[in-house]
Amino acid sequence: MAKGKPVILSKRTFPTQGAASEFFSNMLHGYKPGDRVTDADAVDLASVLDRHPSRDEKVGIGIDHFEVQSADFASQCFRVVRIDGTWARFSYKACIAP
């Protein structure tokens, strides 16, 4: 991951990919698996998800909310819950350095 490239989102800009990664890592680890993400954090997640290489597939018919879930190797990840109740996991890392 190139450290010197800025990450520009709709409501926030990070001077480097490393700064963006740290921000979203801290956000992710501020929740427990099963938690629903706050509306304020959801704004940033929706904005970073716009950068995902499979954005249209992840968003589907539209975003209802975001949650945190358990992932492999005792880790956790974000998931987008669509308005029809289906969901998809996504990596914020894939969004920062697509």
Image: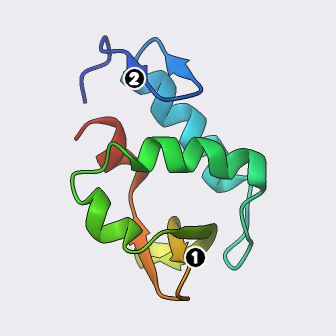
Residue 65 image offset from top left, x and y in percent: 64, 68
Report the disc number at residue 7: 2
Residue depicted at 31% across the width and 11% down the height:
4
Image quadrant assignment for residue 7 = top left
Residue 23's place in the image compared with 94, above or below, is above
Look at the numbered disc 2 and give the secondary structure of its residue: strand
Residue 60's place in the image compared with 24, above or below, is below
Residue depicted at 22% across the width and 41% down the height:
98
Quadrant of the snapshot with the N terminus: top left
Observer-nearest of 70 and 47: 47
Q: CA distance from mark 2 to mark 1?
A: 25 Å
Look at the numbered disc 1 and give the secondary structure of its residue: strand
Quick one: label 2, few (<14), some, or many (20+) residues within 10 Å? many
Residue 2 image offset from top left, x and y in percent: 24, 22
Residue 21 is left or right of residue 37, and the answer is: left
Residue 78 image offset from top left, x and y in percent: 53, 64
Quick one: label 1, few (<14), some, or many (20+) residues within 10 Å? some
**Given contact means CB atoms under 8 Å apart, are the residues at marks 2 and 1 in contact?**
no
Residue 4 is left or right of residue 34, and the answer is: left
Q: Residue furthest bottom?
A: 85
Report the disc number at residue 69: 1
Count of marks overlaid on the render: 2
Residue 2 is left or right of residue 33, and the answer is: left
Observer-nearest of 15 and 75: 15
Image quadrant assignment for residue 59 = bottom left
